[in-house]
Structures are given as structure tokens and as C-alpha cells.
Amino acid sequence: MEKKRCAGFTFAGIAAGIKKKGGRDLGLIVSEAPASVAGVFTRNRVQAAPVLLDRRRVQSGRCQAVIVNSGNANCCTGDAGMRDAEAMSRHAAAALGISEDLVCVASTGVIGQPMPMDAVVLSMPQLTNALSPEGIDEFAEAIMTTDLVPKVVSVQAEMAGTPYTLMGVAKGSGMIRPDMATMLCFIVTDLAVSPEVLQKSLAEGVDRSFNRITVDGDTSTNDTVLMMAGGRSGAAVRSDPEQAEFQARLDDVLIRLARMVVKDGEGATKLVEIAVVGAASEGDARKVADTVAHSNLVKTALFGEDANWGRIIAAAGRSGVPVAPDAIDIRFDGVMMCRNGMTCGNEAEKAVTAVLKKPEYRIVIDLHMGTASASVFTCDFSIDYVKINADYRS
Amino acid sequence: MEKKRCAGFTFAGIAAGIKKKGGRDLGLIVSEAPASVAGVFTRNRVQAAPVLLDRRRVQSGRCQAVIVNSGNANCCTGDAGMRDAEAMSRHAAAALGISEDLVCVASTGVIGQPMPMDAVVLSMPQLTNALSPEGIDEFAEAIMTTDLVPKVVSVQAEMAGTPYTLMGVAKGSGMIRPDMATMLCFIVTDLAVSPEVLQKSLAEGVDRSFNRITVDGDTSTNDTVLMMAGGRSGAAVRSDPEQAEFQARLDDVLIRLARMVVKDGEGATKLVEIAVVGAASEGDARKVADTVAHSNLVKTALFGEDANWGRIIAAAGRSGVPVAPDAIDIRFDGVMMCRNGMTCGNEAEKAVTAVLKKPEYRIVIDLHMGTASASVFTCDFSIDYVKINADYRS
């Protein structure tokens, strides 16, 4: 298999001794020259020090390196936490011989505990020595916490006849576990894109991907999506149609990464799309889809492979949208289970039970109130989710 | 032990063959004469036929009997469901020799399946024969679904020197499982209370009790709280101070029943009060308390007896209230674990871990933004919750 590369970028991932159980826990992405940068961050009022630092740094529109650790979220750590985040960027900048202002920082792991800064500082030579154009897989490993698999997506495309690469890496197996500080995503491209266009495209793409998935309904203190565009391919986004083309490719990468996060959801055994159609507005469709996708009763029924459409219609009923229960149809991968708010009978239930045994399927809820629609990806809620989250720190 | 009675009321609970696994499943409460009635019902848009029927019946302010079944929720059953609910009230009325309009109906159990009306109709003579002033415990059993224990509270008090009784019975062990159609509560008293005062008092009491508990965050299609005041004691609520006295007693009964429901929460091993203090407004306090009380991450940590305050502060951060993370203190039964948004260290964690082993405790979150407060009762989220809800229908 061809090694994944993105011209102008190098990557590293090493074991620095931050994670208690060992393994890679410190990563670095470096661009050969300052790149355009964009960032989307958690909306939680409680925000980790690296998030607060990056919010400030991406304002300039330029970034050359990102240093990331797992094993400690550097959150709820007060002024010392901010000094530690700044120190991480300063040490990386010194080792790379670049300006501190061009370095972003991300952390994920336990919250409320001081960063083991000695481990970070002492590992800096080893980290920069490990940088390689083919190091993305090691980087992907270094940012994992409870993730069972690393998550990397790389696509090749052309812009006005010039080939370019979009490469993304993510970690996260709950939309959040605050003490794991959840979802991190880094995207690099060798396209040239202005910081303004990059920010707009990234925000739109995140809204269509990471904002449409749920594992457990919580929101992390550390969620960060950073993107760097270096321009080394010679291809550039200049016109509106080129921007649309770029957006489509970026959406594809983000959606694939987002689905990988749900599929790797803590304890998850199913990847399920909740599609609401026939809504009066997109906002309504999304409210219903979100409520169903977050319902513990629905998610435990998905785990139990139980054709329990009653829980779905009841979740729709409490979504705040003025649904008409007697108008609702519910299909599982095309099999109608509920028509006009009532059961389609035992034969339908048998067919739906077969669908529920599949690892991936789609539930369509037709409200028959209009033409708007929205989708959310969710996973089932298993005994292992409780085990993982009850035992995490002990 | 003295038998629980409320002058002027009789109760029955029998096995009618509605529940698949057998046991009592049909109950009846009868007042010797038409009583004042008040009702509070689910806000879910999807509402079971008996809920729609009772909403209409309580408008008159008078009620003489309530017939209740478990094993079938009579929800998502279309026009036939409404005909069945009406038939239940008609058959009960005929057996008692009273007007159909004076009978309310409640159902709880699986949704989307037709009511086994033959079982109800054929059991009517047995049901009315079983009526007894001391039958409340049999009635309490007849309305149980996944409940592990029946829930009855009876208090004696005096109004202007005349003794009276308030007696309540509830079922529910998740705030909802739509296919169990969750929470039912019936209160009777031998006080005389006008329907208007009764409705106002019941609505306020429910807001301070059943609206302040959560097991799994869902809302049932069948939630019903009905109260009847017969007046047989000779005591009456006439003045504002008397109403306040009555409200305090009613609140006490409702809060005790609500706590029993959480304590019997599906798979629950802990009863935990989430108290938010120092909020800018009561609305803010409630939003933070609700978000923390519903967080799966918090609830799994409570199950794991893990002093994971990071999940609590992160839930507060995503509540929508503009909290100041650096100002937040968190105490577990008086032990400070987090001060100014930071950990109080290992000694504090040891003390908190001891608190977490208790079956009941209180978590106080001080926002330091004002003087308002609010409390919610929640339970932990255990492996058994998932087992119960994954396997329920199979």
C-alpha cells in the first residue's frame, strides 16, 4: 500500500511517558513554511487551556506546527495550565527554529490534573527527530485515548488540472467524555487557500459532519478541529466554483472521519443514521433527529436489536417540534414498521428485526408536515459503554 | 402495623390476565360519592388514549372512580385505542352503578398493541368485589411494570383541629420507558377541596416533585398524576393559610413518592441530589442541575463510585448558562472536591470516594453568580439499566 503523504508536511508520534499505561502520547505536525490555518472549537463554557491558546493563535491566519498530547487534557488547571500550554508551544518552536506564535497546541485525557511538563520537554528532541512525511499513522496513534482504532483519511483530487491532497486525522470515541476530553481532528492540504476561505469552509464542513454525530450527548471541554493549507502542490482555490469543489472534498473527508468516530463509539456495536424527512423546516427535522439519536431508550433498544418503534415515536413526541403522531411513518432500511403512528404488524417486525442485526443501517422518520430533512449519525448504547465510563479513572 | 385507609375511598387490585407474565394488572379506586378531581399529564406530543380521555373528563372537576391497568399502554393504537379507553370507563361505571363521565382511566405497559379488552371486561365483577378500604397495597401492585417495589405514602394531619388523611400511590422506575409508559400517580384525601384549588395545588406540587427527578431523561406518552378529594373527614380547605398548610402536606407526599421512583430507577444503586446554589436565577440553577443530572458521563461515574468532578463541571459548562468556570465549587455531602474550578487534591478525593459509596448523598455545585438555587434528584446509570432496556420486549 502506498504510504500516505501530503506535500510540505511532516508528522511524528512518540511515547513520551504522559499516558499511565504507556504507548505513543505526543504528536507533532509541521509545515515546511507558515501555512493558512483555520480552527473550530468546543462551545462548552469550560474550555481547556490549549483551546483558549489556539483560539488566539488562529486569529493571525498563519500556523506552521501543531503539538498534541494524549493522557492529560490540561483542563481545569487554572493559570498554571495556560503557562503549560504556552510552554509546550515555546519548546516546540525552539526545537523547530520557528516563532512561538506559529505553533498551536492540543491536549486530550484526564482533566483537573497538572500537565507532566518534564515528560514533554525532555521528549522534544526525540519528537522532532521522528518527523517524517510518512509519519501520519504514528501521529494518529499518539492522539488516541479510548479509541480502539486510529482514524486517518487521505484523498487525492485535482484543482484546475493540478493534483492535490487532503489528509485528515481524528481521535474520539465518545462525542465527549470530559475527562478524556474527546474529539480532536487535524486536516492538512497542499492546496493554497486563504485563511478566510479556509475558516469558512472548515466551519461549514464541521457543521455537516462532527456536528451531526452523537455517541453520548455530552460536549467536551477540549474539542478542536484545526486545518492547515500549505500550497506546496501548486494548486489553489481562487474562484467560487473552485471553492465549491474544495468544500465538497473537505466535507467528504470530515464526514468519513466523523463516521469513523461514531463507529468507534465507546462500546458501540452499530452505526445508525437517523434521517428525518417531511419536516416543516430543517430546524424541526434536526431537533427530531437529535432527540431520537440521543435517547437512551432508543439507543439501548438498538443495542438489544429490538424493533421498538414506540421509543422512536415517543422521542419525536418530546422533541419540542409540534409533530402530528397520527401522520408519522417509520422505516428501517426501507422496511415500513410504523404507518400513520401505528404498527405495521408482526411480519413487518420480523423484517425489521433482520435489519437491526446489521452493523450499519438507516432509520427514516417521515413526519408528513413538509419537505425539509436532516440526518444524524448515532450508535447503540451497550453494556460496555457503562463499563468503560464507570471504570475509566479507577 | 395499622392498615392504610382514607375515609370514603375503597381500592382493589387483581390479576386480569393482561400482563404476559401474570400477576396483578388491573386496579380500581372508588370514592363513595363524586369527589373533586385534578390532573397533571405528560407534555409529550404523543399521548396515549387514556390521557386524552382523562384530560377531557377532569375538566368537569368531578370524578368518582379511576380504573388502571398495567401490561398495555393503549398508546399509538389509533381510533380503536380511544374506543377501548372509553369502553374501560363504561364497563367500570356500569359495574359501580355510576355515570361514565365520572370515571377516569390510566394504562401503562407496551405501546402500539391493541388492548386485550376481553380480559378487562370479564374481570369487572372480580374487580368490584375486591374493593376494600384497606386495598391500597393490592392496587399499588396492580399498577407496577418494571418496578421492584410498590410505592405508597400515607400521612395524617389536622386542618383547624380536624384530622384528615392524604394517601398517594405511584408506579414508575424510569422517568420513562415509552414502551412501559412509565409514571402514574394517584392521590386521594378525605379533605374537602374545591376543584380549582385542587388543580392549582397539584400542579405546583408536581412541579416541585415529579418534575425534579430524572432516571433516563425520556418523557412518557402516558404520564398521569390524578388526585381526588372526597371531604369525608369533615376537614376542608377554605382560607389561604389552610391552602398553604395543605400544599405543604401534599408537596411532602409527592416528593416522597418521587424519591421512591428514582430510588427504584431501572438498575439504580444510588439516589443522588444535584443541588445548584449561587445561581443568578432559579431558571439558571435548574438548567445546570438538569444538565448534570441527565449526563450519562456523570451518571456512569456515580455508578463507578468515581470522584470525577471534571464530568460535573463540563456538564455545567454545556448547560447553556453563562457559568464562570473559575468560580465554581463542588462539594459531595459537604466535602469540597473542586474550588475555583480546580481540584482540591488527593486527600479530598479520598474523602469524596467514601461519600460515593453511600446509597444516598448530595452534590452541591456553587456557581458564585448570585443567590438562586434548585435541586434535582437523579440516580446512577448502571449496567443493569442497559440490560433492562435492551431486553425488555424480547
Image: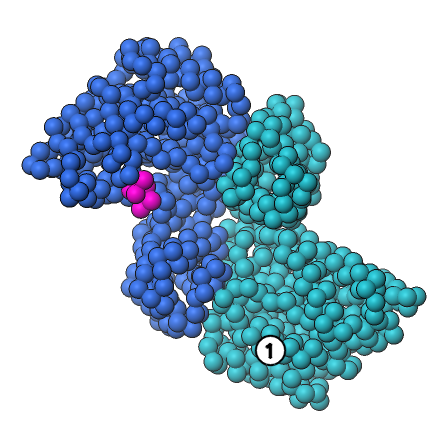
Chain colours: A cyan, B blue
- On-image quarter of the C terminus of chain B: top right
Percent position of residue B96, x then y: 29, 12
Eyeballing the image, is A152 above or below B195? below
Q: Neighbour class for label 1 at 10 Å: few (<14), some, many (≥20)?
A: few
Residue topped by disc 1? A56
Query: What residue lies at 36% left-to-right and 63% top-to-bottom?
Result: B279
Q: Chain of mark 1?
A: A
Percent position of residue B277, x then y: 33, 62
As shown in the figure, which amino acid type bears the numbered disc 1? Arg
Query: What residue lies at 48% left-to-right and 55% top-to-bottom?
Result: B297
Residue B322 placement, left or right of B231: right
Percent position of residue B364, x then y: 33, 61
Q: In the image, which residues are magenta?
A: B203-209
- On-image quarter of the N terminus of chain B: top left
In this view of the protein, can residue A92 be seen by the observer?
no
Choose between B179 and B244: the one closer to the eye: B244
Q: Is residue B236 magenta?
A: no
Query: What residue lies at 47% left-to-right and 58% top-to-bottom?
Result: B319
Eyeballing the image, is A244 above or below B368? above
Query: What residue lies at 9% left-to-right and 33% top-to-bottom?
Result: B162
> Can you tell which quarter of the image residue B38 is in?
top left
* Residue at the outermost left position: B161
Residue A165 placement, left or right of B114: right
Eyeballing the image, is A176 above or below A197? above
Choose between A18 and B320: the one closer to the eye: B320
